[in-house]
């Protein structure tokens, strides 16, 4: 693969953090508390130079890296995350379209 980066969600307002223009703070369910940004660079990407607005949860990284990138198997494991490699690699719609935070995101 190549490098991938993922930010931490939300700043602590009581310690000088500022999440503007997003509403909320770390630990809240507003965008300022749960939204983060990420970056992926890889020769494995089919659709490059784009911005995705799909939802991805931190628990999705493990199955995405094992199944999607390394072509491993997680059969029989109960995981909270989904393999999101198709969404990252080619921009296919991921699990998160039309769902609220945390809804429908538990396979076990």
Image (cartoon, rainbow, N blue to C red):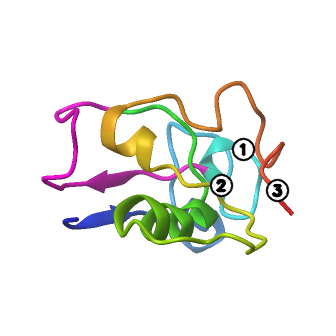
Residue 78 to residue 37: above or below: below
- Of circles 3 and 2, the one toward us is 3
Q: Answer yes or no: do the residues labelled 2 and 1 have beta carbons within 8 Å?
A: yes
Residue position marked by numbered label 1 in the rendering? 30
Residue position marked by numbered label 3 in the rendering? 106
Q: Quadrant of the C terminus?
A: bottom right
Q: What residue appears at the point 78 percent right and 36 percent down from the top-left corner?
A: 100
- Of circles 3 and 1, the one toward us is 3
Circle 2: element type: helix
Residue 32 to residue 7: above or below: above
Q: Residue 5: which disc? A: none
Q: Residue 33: which disc? A: 2
Classify 10 Å Cα crowding around label 1: few (below 14), some (14-19), many (20 and above): some
The residue stretch that appears in magenta = 35-51
**Would residue 41 be found to the left or right of residue 74 on screen?**
left
Q: CA distance from mark 3 to mark 1?
A: 21 Å
């Amino acid at each position: 693969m190549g490098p991938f980066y993922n930010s931490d969600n939300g700043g602590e307002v009581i310690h000088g953090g500022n999440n503007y223009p997003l509403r909320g703070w770390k630990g809240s369910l507003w965008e300022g508390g749960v939204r983060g940004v990420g970056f992926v660079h890889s020769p494995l990407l089919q659709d490059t130079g784009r911005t995705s607005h799909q939802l991805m949860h931190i628990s999705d990284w493990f199955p995405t890296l094992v199944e999607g990138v390394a072509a491993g198997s997680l059969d029989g494991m109960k995981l909270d995350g989904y393999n999101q490699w198709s969404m990252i690699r080619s921009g296919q719609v991921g699990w998160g379209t039309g769902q609220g935070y945390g809804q429908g995101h538990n396979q076990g």
